[in-house]
Image (cartoon, grey):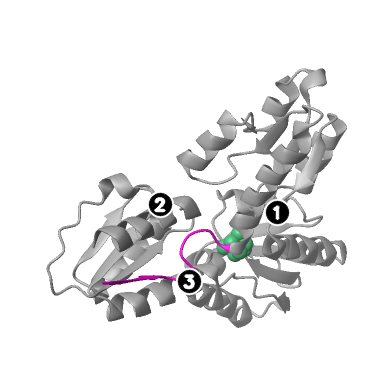
Amino acid sequence: MEVILAEHAGFCFGVQRAVDTVYEQIEKKKADGSLIYTFGPIIHNEEVVGDLQERGVRVLDSLADAGEVPKGKRGTVIIRSHGVEKAVCESLKEMGYEVVDATCPFVKRIHNIVEKESAAGKSIVIVGNAGHPEVEGIKGWSASATYVVESVEEAENLACSPGEELCIVSQTTFNYKKFQDVVEIFRERGYNGSVVNTVCNATEVRQAEARELAARVDVMIVIGGNHSSNTRKLYEICRQECEMTYYIQTLDDLHLKLPESVRLVGITAGASTPNNIIEEVQNYVRINF
Ligand code: F3S
């Protein structure tokens, strides 16, 4: 039986880079024993965060949290891939932390655009979810009026003045089609300004690849956390193409009884599933079937 692993299963480039940064910092700081923190959990995966905790990495949930750490224990803070507001970086430095910025370069690009365009006098429109840390971070790089809209209705009802020049960007994980629909509303409303497509295609690529793989195989295994919405979405996509699709969190959940006719097994994983779990599952299926 053959096992095929989707090329883009698991971490996207930005998350992988942020997780790698934490492990690199652990190695670097071993010698002088200085402490390492991440600003918010580096990734929504309990196993990874637990492993880092065992290696001494602590999570700071807010600036208030950072301020409570005694001065002598303020080591290195790693900014995760979502990025943070400019003021957060500055405050951390003022508190005496060394800041290591693992903001995904695609998110950093948005910060740079927003900083530049707002300084030039444009108002910023972020198409995305106002409560998402990435959007909060992007907002914090704007020096002018900043609006967050998540839907066509919100774009229709946004109270900005007709003469206002806008720069429209999007949250990286926003659906591209929905982004276009929102942009269209601003066009219809007659606003001037620029539109920068800042949607990252990592999610789309992972989903398209999962669909294509699921259509080819006899059995499909989707690995990811129970609460991971992007894993659930992957599962639904695969299930449409392949009836024998299994959703598991770790190898422990895998109780496969495969019929003799099964020749091809496909594996994919959600954006916060670490490589070692994917490898474990892959090896298990290879050896046991
Ligand atoms: Fe990942 Fe960066 Fe895209 S964190 S989803 S590669 S914007």
Specify the quadrant that holds the N terminus: bottom left
Q: Earlier in the sequence, mark 1 or mark 2?
A: 1
Residue that label 3 marks:
7
Q: Amino acid at mark 2?
A: Ser
Residue 4 on the magenta span: yes
Q: Position of residue 119 (x, y in %)?
A: 86, 62
In the rendered structure, find residue 228 and report the number of the disc placed on it: 2
Residue that label 1 marks:
103
Inter-mark Cα distance, 1 to 2: 21 Å
- The answer to which image quadrant residue 128 occupies is bottom right
Q: Earlier in the sequence, mark 2 or mark 3?
A: 3
Q: Earlier in the sequence, mark 3 or mark 1?
A: 3
- The answer to which image quadrant residue 244 occupies is bottom left
Callout 2 environment at 10 Å: few (<14), some (14 to 19), or many (20+)? some
Q: Position of residue 188 (x, y in %)?
A: 59, 82
Q: Nearer the viewer, residue 211 or 220?
A: 220
Q: Amino acid at mark 3?
A: Glu
Q: Is residue 136 visible?
A: no
Q: Nearer the viewer, residue 98 or 110?
A: 98
